[in-house]
Image (cartoon, grey):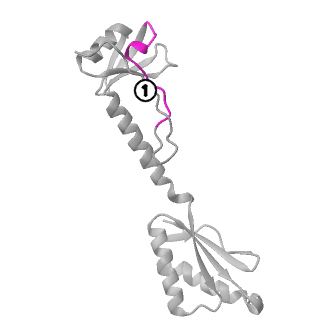
């Protein structure tokens, strides 16, 4: 049998490290509605019940009655283990945060006079970044009179596109930014 007191947990984002769901949970006797629509722990609809009957049903199963949608008529509650629900929500948030790596850009810098071996080392590094899901910005720097030969830079960037073709594709054609020729490659 459960105790007659309720625990309301106000979960706030932590300042350092893991961000926990910033949601206020209303549970058990803190639900102030006459009747609620109840969803069972397995996801099936129980129906519309008086709040006290729904709380009793949750206590019979050794779980909590958690208010999940206030806007409904009547409000929607779920019978669930609160600790497990919170754990799954935090896990889902961490996974979605981990998947948003696409915004990060790694940069590879080349020069117009780069040697073959150095070029291949840079291409391997770019393949590694694309394999991890990062975008790669390839910057080809021109110095001095090298600006009069942009065709040399285009050849290097075309070669880079060829080397990285199975790992990613260019977002746009290469562009000039000052004395640099820029190419951004997104992972496939």
**Could you classify mark 1 by the number of other residues whose Cα lies within 10 Å: few (under 14), some (14-19), or many (20 or more)?**
few
- Magenta highlight on residue 117: no
Residue beneath the point at 37% across and 16% down: 28
Q: Is residue 153 left or right of residue 8?
A: right
Q: Is residue 148 left or right of residue 114?
A: right
User: Is the magenta region chiefly helix, strand or loop?
Assistant: loop
Q: Position of residue 154 (x, y in %)?
A: 66, 84
Q: Nearer the viewer, residue 186 or 144?
A: 144
Residue beneath the point at 77% across and 92% down: 145
Q: Nearer the viewer, residue 179 or 15?
A: 15
Q: Position of residue 42 (x, y in %)?
A: 28, 28
**Where 131 sits versus 139, above or below?**
above
Q: Position of residue 58 (x, y in %)?
A: 29, 17
Query: Where does the N terminus fall, quadrant-wise?
Result: top left
Q: Secondary structure at mark 1?
A: loop
The residue that disc 1 covers is 9
Q: Is residue 137 left or right of residue 21?
A: right
**Where 122 sits versus 28, above or below?**
below
Name the quadrant containing residue 8.
Answer: top left
Q: Which residues are magenta?
A: 21-34
């Amino acid at each position: 049998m459960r105790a007659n007191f309720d625990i309301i947990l106000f979960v706030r984002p932590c300042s350092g490290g893991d961000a926990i769901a910033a949601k206020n949970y209303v549970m058990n006797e803190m639900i102030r509605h006459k009747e609620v629509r109840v969803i069972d722990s397995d996801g099936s609809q129980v129906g519309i019940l008086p709040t006290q009957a729904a709380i009793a049903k949750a206590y019979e199963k050794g779980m909590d009655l958690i208010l999940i949608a206030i806007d409904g008529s009547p409000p929607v509650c779920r019978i669930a283990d609160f600790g497990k629900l919170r754990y799954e929500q935090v896990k889902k948030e961490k996974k979605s945060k981990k998947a948003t790596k696409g915004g990060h850009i790694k940069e590879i810098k080349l020069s117009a006079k780069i040697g073959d071996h150095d070029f291949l080392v840079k291409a391997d590094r770019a393949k590694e970044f694309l394999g991890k899901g990062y975008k790669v910005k390839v910057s080809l720097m021109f110095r001095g009179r090298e600006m009069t030969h942009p065709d040399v830079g285009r050849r290097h960037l075309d070669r880079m596109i060829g080397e990285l073709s199975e790992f990613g594709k260019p977002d746009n054609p290469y562009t000039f930014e000052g004395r640099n020729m820029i190419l951004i490659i997104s992972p496939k």
